[in-house]
Image (spheres, rainbow, N blue to C red):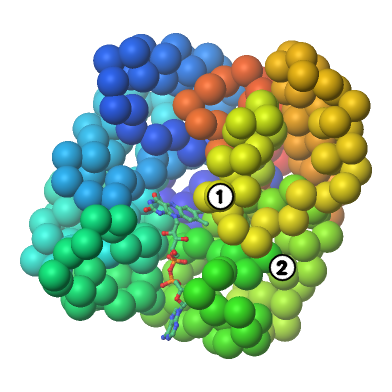
Amino acid sequence: MHMSDVIKRDSTTFSFEFFPPNSENGWNQLEATITELTQLGPSFVSVTYGAGGSTRTKTHDLVSRLKEREALDPVPHLTCVGHDHAEIHEILTRYAKAGISNILALRGDPPVEDSSEDPFKHFPYAADLIGSITEFNRSGAHPDPRGFSIGAAGFPEGHPETPNTLTQMDHLKRKIDAGVEWLCSQMFFDNRMFLDWQERCRLKGIDVPIFAGIMPVTSLAGLKRMAELAAGTNFPAPLLRALERAGPDPENIERVGIHWATEQCLQLMDEGVAGIHFYTLNRSNATIEIYKSLGVVDSEQLRGR
Ligand SMILES: Cc1cc2nc3c(=O)[nH]c(=O)nc-3n(C[C@H](O)[C@H](O)[C@H](O)COP(=O)(O)OP(=O)(O)OC[C@H]3O[C@@H](n4cnc5c(N)ncnc54)[C@H](O)[C@@H]3O)c2cc1C
């Protein structure tokens, strides 16, 4: 379903991010997670795009599998790093033919391996990819006359490559002007950071729906990985204190993480956020627990509230 229709239908969207697994075990785990989370009736689910090579075709495989299930609306992520225009056109054509309505368009990060070719030669920034998708939409190559609904990433606590927050907002606005209809935020643990950034977006004239990225802490190792992945993210002292009090017991840690994320969701809903996007890490437990604590077990019950 085109994102503009999803947004019309769901007064608050609830969505989940998955990544394509690398092993048979991983696929089995993900299948179980998908079965459980399907019952929550998410507005859409998104699938990350790998750094290169075979991991990239896995995104397409997972998107196809999800599409076959019919109950879920998959939104592929697409990064332009290392791609040329012909490759992007081919990917878009394949998704259009498969009836995919939405794409989360990203730049991606340079590959860790040294390469002689500049990975940003063809698409220096996400805005350039977004421009290409908009052109594709205008060409009438998508069965829906509106074409793909394009989403982009936003960083409430800044992006490490652009320390100047005013300049960063200029870059974000450029993505909107290139054709973005919705934004999905980087994970955050301090709602004040998100709400302030959202207000700064509005002041800049960015008035598209913004989905808040929530990742519940489920382990201390996970917390460290998050700090690596989302450089610059603030972990508020009360969260760190609660985790310390929880001690080494993994169940206690997860309970604290779920509680914190639930409180975040409740406040964001009170603030009228357009949507909540859960970074699931292909697990279902934390997301289901949060749903239960929001007082619902099926997001359809939340729709229209
Ligand atoms: C919701 C979400 C989903 C993600 N999914 C994936 C995924 O599936 N796969 C993956 O590999 N990565 C993913 N990422 C990570 C993302 O690709 C990286 O964080 C990347 O560094 C930034 O991507 P972007 O699309 O925001 O890039 P851009 O919008 O291009 O921004 C990148 C940097 O360049 C700066 N910039 C932009 N335009 C200009 C300009 N004209 N001149 C100078 N500087 C400029 C920006 O301020 C920013 O610092 C995701 C991130 C988020 C928040």
Q: Which quarter of the rendering shows the C terminus? A: top right
Which label number is shown at residue 18? none
Q: Is residue 239 visible?
A: yes
Position of 264 with respect to 13 (left or right) is right
Q: Give coordinates of residue 73: x percent, y percent.
A: 41, 36
* Measured Cα–Cα span from mark 1 to mark 2: 24 Å
Q: Which residue is mark 1?
A: 228
Q: Is residue 42 above or below residue 250?
A: below
Q: Which quarter of the rendering shows the N terminus? A: top left
Q: Of the residues under marks 1 and 2, which one precedes in the sequence?
A: 2
- The secondary structure type at the circle numbered 2 is helix
**Quadrant location of residue 133?**
bottom left
Position of 123 with respect to 163 (left or right) is left
Image quarter for ligand 1: bottom left
Q: Is residue 32 above or below residue 146?
A: above
| Kind of residue sitting beneath label 1 | Glu
Which label number is shown at residue 198? 2
Tell me if the residue at label 1 has its CB under 8 Å from ligand 1: no
